[in-house]
Every structure is written in C-alpha cells, then in structure tokens.
Amino acid sequence: MHLSLSSTFATVALSVLSLTSTSAASLNLPKTAYRMPARTADPSNPALTWHVSQFDLGCSPGGCVYSFNILGHASENTPGFNTSCNGTSTQDDYAPCKDEGILAQIEPATYPNWTVSVQHQWREAMFEEYYAFGEKNVSVAGNSTRTFTIPVTSVYGVA
C-alpha cells in the first residue's frame, strides 16, 4: 500500500500545548487543533520574553508604518532568533519579518496606544510545527517607546 505525503500528514496525531487562552484561529492553526488545559509558564525562563529595540512608528492619512528589531533567546525547546520587522497598520494579517519564522502585526488601541503582536513559528522533524505568541500594548506618544519586552503568552505544538 502506498501512502502519499498529504494523506500521511492528515493522519498524524495532533497535540497542542497552551499557556493562555489565545484561540487557535488567531494563530492560523489547523481547525483540527485542540487546546490542552492551561499550564503555568516559568517566568524566569528567558525564552519566554522577547526583546524589542529601535521601535519606530510613523503615520499619515493613509495608515501607519512600523519597524523594529526583535530578539528571542533560545531554550531547550525553542530556537532563538534575532531579526527585524516592518509593515503597515493597513495589513489584514501578520507580516513576515526578515526571518520568515517571525511574523508581526500592529493594531491601534486607544490613542496613543498600539498593540504589537508577534508570532514565532518553527519546525522540528518532518511533521512537528510549533507556534509561540506574544503581544504588548505600547504608547507611541512622542515616539518615546523605542525599547520594550513582549511576554510570550501562548505556545502551541502540532505534531
């Protein structure tokens, strides 16, 4: 019997780890993904805090553009990254950063605040995909917020 890669992938067992209540839909996970009970993250783990620097945001009547650098430390279970991101407030979804395993999006909150959302996705082995998600509300009054941290709030795995 010959199985194609796509049919084999469709039969792979699915497992998910969640640290908070972010929905699978917001991370573009398969509809077959399910959430396991919430677990407490170790706040001392440096891989659960991403470091943003050189954050810039400029707006015009047509929308806003952003750029920033972001660093995530590696851990036993998570690869590290160091990349730059840019995009616009008019995009409908996350935009890939220079390292395409990192996606970013900004959304306006109550002026002058913005929500900066970042997703880290990586693969291990042939059928294992992992996603980490974090977001931070920042104030851009006078462009004073150039450096901040984003806590990782959700981690999912599909295997």
Image (spheres, rainbow, N blue to C red):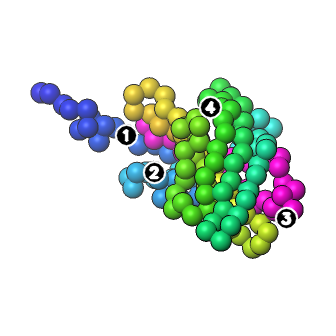
Q: Secondary structure at mark 1?
A: loop
Inspect the magenta stretch and tell me whether residue 4 lies in it. Answer: no
Q: Which mark is residue 13?
A: 1
Tell me which label, 1 or 2, sits earlier in the chain: 1
- Residue 60 % position (x, y): 68, 67
- Residue assigned mark 4: 78
- Does the CB distance between marks 2 and 3 fall below 8 Å? no
Between marks 2 and 3, how big is the CA–CA gap? 35 Å
Measured as percent of width and height from the top left, residue 116 is found at 69, 56
Tag nearer the camera, 3 or 1: 3
Please tell me which of labels 3 and 4 falls first in the chain.
Answer: 4
In magenta stretch: residue 158: yes
- Please indicate whether residue 75 sits to the left or right of residue 53 in the image: left
Amino acid bearing label 2: Leu
Residue type, mark 4 in image: Thr
Q: Position of residue 144 (x, y in %)?
A: 87, 56
Q: CA distance from mark 2 to mark 4?
A: 18 Å
Secondary structure beneath dot 3 equals helix
Question: What residue lies at 71% left-to-right and 70% top-to-bottom?
Answer: 109
Name the residue carrying label 3.
Answer: 141
**Crowding at mark 3 (Cα within 10 Å: few <14, some 14-19, many 20+):** few
Q: Residue at x 50, y 45 (%)?
A: 16
Please provide the residue range marked out in magenta: 132-159
- Mark nearer the viewer, 1 or 2: 2
x 70%, y 64%: residue: 59
| Among the 4 quarters of the image, the one containing residue 159 | top left
Left of 67 or right of it: where is 143? right
Q: From the image, tell me which residue sits under label 2.
A: 29
**Closer mark to the observer between disc 4 and disc 1:** 4
Q: Nearer the viewer, residue 96 or 133?
A: 96
Q: From the viewer's side, name the closer residue of 51 and 59.
A: 59
Q: State the SS at label 4.
A: loop
